Image: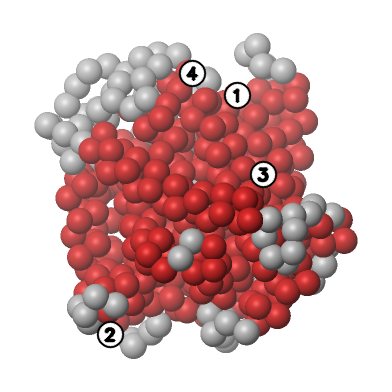
């Protein structure tokens, strides 16, 4: 692949190794946030103890998706990731649609997480006598992320490394405590049995599992800033899926073992909030001090995810500006930091506006801001993954470029169909899944389709006004 040339309008090349990229994307998946805020409700509303087996299924599906994803990453090096792959495989117009959907996806994920962060921070600091409304903490987070996102990407990576390591360690400490003690009534493999996996409402459990992985796919976003990207990006992708998958499988299984399969649902139903389940286990197996630390790390886990999604969406905006989909001014990097600073500033302003809108509307930071927006993001990413899978097939159809049929045809088709089905399910049941009543249950998921159409039209206009530039959309930079 061609190496990027040095220049003022280039992302900061050769600055991220495998570990840095892995931490950037694992932090977006927010493992402690998923363990505390995602796994318990997936058990309660989904398939109970079978969530551990569901994570096995989803991990395998995403590993299969990664085969084609990584194969294409070896031939298309572009910070636009989903956009670049779609444009290279399905054409510039579809690439334009993918670009705006990706911007919407990471926008909504990042801004939605600010609601959860504000709520968690408000409760955490209240225990220490500092009582402030949730939105104060959300605004503080926006300010901190604005500084980190504006500067060099390796600064963000260093911050995320520390936070992600800490949250992994505290959950692994709980896992080890349950494992060593033998749990509530002995360790067993029941959560992996087909009967448990298909119990309750398995479709909801599977969807929660997919949502817990959102962010892993961002490895290719950092391709232009990676050291030796043809090796670094594929390695980081497989590492991310593997680390996240094993962590979720192990943790969900041991969380069940902590109370026992038979006691799981009564325990969850007896809690005022399913998110308290992880801390109930912490109090039982780790003690009060470590459980308090877990609460603080829960807050920093969400902050890490907010920062990671901010970095991702800033890069998508930069690429969209550089490629002619958004105004050219957006596609400019900082002269000193070589960061996508315009995209970062735009994201900061959007976050301020949207959060303020929810505050003025008196809406709940978790049930409304977090749930509504992050589910729009999940829906958008599933659609992008389906598009990318089919783009892989189209890209390699004329020339396999040394790649095997499993990575260019079999796995991409299989995972593309799976993602498309999941997209349709979430779109259809969006209101029921998120509690968005009435017209909101239709309008929120429809945003994905509306934005896709706008992106398609903008790319079509570029084809007329600048056909040369249009023909280069998605190419390696």
Nearest to N terminus: mark 2 or mark 1: 1
Q: CA distance from mark 4 to mark 3?
A: 22 Å
Q: Residue at x 73, y 74 (%)?
A: 263
Task: Give the residue pinned by disc 4.
Answer: 231
* Residue 235 point in image, percent of width and height: 52, 25
Circle 4 or circle 3, nearest the eye = 3
* Residue 323 point in image, percent of width and height: 35, 36
Nearest to N terminus: mark 1 or mark 4: 1
Q: Which is nearer the eye, 145 or 264?
A: 264
Residue 360 is marked as: 2
Q: CA distance from mark 2 to mark 4?
A: 48 Å
Q: CA distance from mark 1 to mark 4?
A: 11 Å
Q: Please give left or right for residue 263 compared with residue 220 in the image.
A: right
Mark 3 touching mark 1, by CB under 8 A? Answer: no
Nearest to N terminus: mark 3 or mark 1: 3
- Would you call the spot at circle 4 few (<14 residues within 10 Å), some (14-19), or many (20 or more)? some
Residue 416 visible somewhere in the drawing = no
Local SS, label 4: helix
Residue 71 is marked as: 1
Residue 372 is marked as: none
Q: Residue at x 18, y 60 (%)?
A: 143
Q: Which is nearer the eye, 241 or 78?
A: 241
Task: Give the residue pinned by disc 3.
Answer: 59
């Amino acid at each position: 692949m061609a190496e990027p040339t040095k220049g003022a309008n280039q992302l900061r090349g050769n600055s991220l190794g495998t570990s840095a990229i892995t931490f950037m994307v694992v932090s977006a998946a927010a493992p402690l946030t998923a363990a505390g805020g995602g796994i318990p409700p997936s058990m309660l509303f989904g398939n109970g103890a079978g969530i551990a087996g569901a994570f096995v299924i989803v991990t395998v599906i995403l590993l299969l998706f990664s085969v084609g994803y990584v194969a294409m990453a070896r031939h298309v090096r572009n910070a636009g990731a989903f956009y670049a792959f779609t444009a290279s495989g399905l054409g510039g117009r579809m690439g334009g649609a993918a670009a705006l959907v990706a911007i919407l996806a990471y926008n909504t994920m990042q801004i939605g997480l600010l609601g959860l962060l504000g709520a968690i921070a408000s409760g955490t600091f209240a225990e220490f006598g500092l009582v402030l409304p949730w939105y104060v903490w959300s605004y503080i987070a926006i300010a901190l992320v604005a500084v980190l996102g504006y500067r060099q990407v390796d600064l963000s990576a260093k911050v995320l490394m520390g936070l992600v390591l800490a949250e992994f360690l505290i959950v692994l400490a709980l896992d080890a405590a349950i494992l060593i003690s033998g749990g509530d009534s002995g360790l067993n493999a029941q959560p992996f049995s087909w009967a448990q996996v298909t119990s309750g409402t398995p479709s909801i459990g599977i969807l929660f599992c997919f949502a817990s992985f959102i962010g892993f796919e961002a490895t290719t976003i950092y391709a232009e800033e990676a050291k030796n990207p043809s090796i670094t990006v594929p390695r980081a992708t497989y590492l991310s899926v593997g680390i996240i998958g094993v962590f979720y499988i192990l943790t969900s299984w041991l969380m069940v073992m902590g109370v026992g399969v038979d006691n799981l649902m009564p325990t969850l139903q007896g809690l005022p909030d399913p998110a308290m389940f992880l801390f109930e286990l912490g109090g039982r197996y780790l003690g009060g001090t470590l459980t308090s630390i877990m609460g603080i790390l829960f807050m920093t886990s969400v902050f890490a995810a907010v920062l990671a999604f901010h970095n991702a969406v800033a890069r998508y905006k930069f690429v969209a500006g550089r490629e002619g989909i958004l105004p050219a001014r957006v596609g400019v990097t900082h002269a000193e930091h070589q960061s996508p600073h315009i995209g970062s500033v735009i994201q900061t302003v959007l976050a301020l506006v949207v959060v303020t809108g929810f505050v003025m509307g008196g809406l709940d930071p978790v049930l409304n801001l977090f749930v509504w927006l992050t589910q729009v993001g999940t829906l958008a990413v599933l659609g992008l993954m389906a598009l990318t899978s089919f783009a892989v097939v189209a890209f390699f159809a004329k020339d396999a470029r040394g790649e095997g049929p499993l990575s260019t045809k079999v796995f991409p088709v299989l995972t593309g169909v799976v993602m498309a089905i999941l997209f349709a399910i979430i779109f259809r049941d969006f209101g029921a899944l998120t509690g968005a009543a009435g017209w909101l249950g239709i309008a929120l998921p429809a945003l994905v389709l509306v934005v896709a159409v706008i992106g398609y039209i903008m790319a079509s206009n570029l084809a007329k006004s600048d056909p040369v530039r249009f023909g280069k959309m998605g190419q390696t930079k």
